[in-house]
Image (cartoon, rainbow, N blue to C red):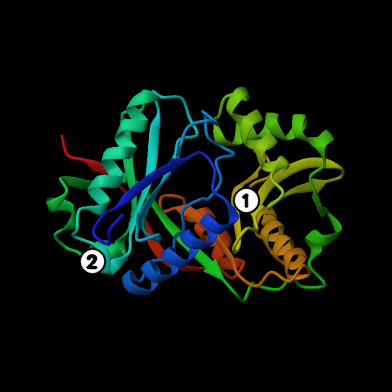
Amino acid sequence: MTKQEIGITATANLTNIQKTEVNELMEKIHQHDGTCKDPYLSNQYSYFPEMPIFISAYESGALVGFVMIYADEKPNEEVDLYVEVLPEKRRQGIAKKLVVRVKQILAQYNYSNIFYIAEQNFLKKNDSFLSANNLEVDNESLDYYMETTNPTVLSKNDSLSELLMVVKMAEQDIAKVVNIYSEAFGESQEASQMYVTQGYKDDKTLCFLLKKQDKIIGYCCVDCSKTAYFYGLFIAKGYRGQGYGTYFIKKMMELLQGRGVKVFALDVELNNPAAVQTYQNAGFKIKSEVVYLKEKK
């Protein structure tokens, strides 16, 4: 393969070496674009476990482009794409080659409702990107990416410490969590079972429970593969609006700091001001606005 040739590979799983390559690629992209959000480098939530969701572009053995397909639902639902190209290799057709391969894969699995994940900082620096690629922002799907290296410390006199307890989830808790997860997020039992079970099984993930008088009233997973990334967090209905969410995340960060974790991150929907406030109360700052792009019809 000559320097000008681009090799495209597709796989359902990444090796540790490949994950390192992607992380190094993303660091260069973030530094250039002023972006923050990383693609998820696991297929544990893929609806089709065998589906190739990591598509890589190599030039002379070096990673120059990457796509991650996030397809955790049935083919009639939406699928999200991270499309990333090394800044100095852009406008050379690499992204188009990657997307062509991606669409071939999606067609094989009957996915057609495609969204592209991007950040406002990138769009501001590339003001012709949307029109050049016939894309538009889906204004119904907007997130804040939030981060902190200085979480708010729990007061030793916090009254909730006497009412609440934060513990790691055990295997026997899965069935109970699935039921309240389904109710909290409006997911089917099948989907809830998959999310909770796979999160528990992942050796890079820690799952925490919030308990009140031994009753599970909250749940959260933390992906510790790079930063401590919080996802799936909820407080059960009937227990919201009482400061339990703020206490929960503060306590989890305290426990994780004891393990040596220094950076904490999460995504939250812009149209959920109560959740945004909860995370700000815990010390999180808005670092970026995440947008979802769709092709114009």
**Label 2: few (<14), some or many (≥20) within 10 Å?**
few
**Label 1: few (<14), some or many (≥20) within 10 Å?**
few
For marks 2 and 1, give the one nearer the viewer. Answer: 2
Query: Which residue is located at x 14 percent, y 59 percent?
Result: 128
Q: Is residue 48 above or below residue 241?
A: above
Position of the C terminus, as image quadrant, is top left
From the viewer's side, name the closer residue of 281 and 241: 281
From the viewer's side, name the closer residue of 275 and 100: 100
Left/right placement of residue 213 relative to residue 219 reads: right
Q: Dot 1 corresponds to which residue?
A: 241
Query: Which residue is located at x 32 percent, y 64 percent?
Result: 86
* Residue 70, position as x, y percentages in the image: 45, 41
* Residue 253, position as x, y percentages in the image: 70, 65
Secondary element at tag 1:
loop
Mark 1 residue type: Gly
From the viewer's side, name the closer residue of 188 and 37: 37
Q: Does residue 137 appear in the picture of this structure?
A: no
Mark 2 residue type: Lys
* Residue 241, position as x, y percentages in the image: 62, 51
Q: Does residue 285 appear in the picture of this structure?
A: yes
Left/right placement of residue 289 relative to residue 5 reads: right
Residue 172: quadrant of the picture: top right
Q: Could you give the CA–CA distance between mark 2 and mark 1, rounded to whole angstroms?
A: 36 Å
Q: Dot 2 corresponds to which residue?
A: 124
Position of the N terminus, as image quadrant, is bottom left
Q: Earlier in the sequence, mark 2 or mark 1?
A: 2
From the viewer's side, name the closer residue of 58 and 147: 58
Left/right placement of residue 259 relative to residue 271 reads: right
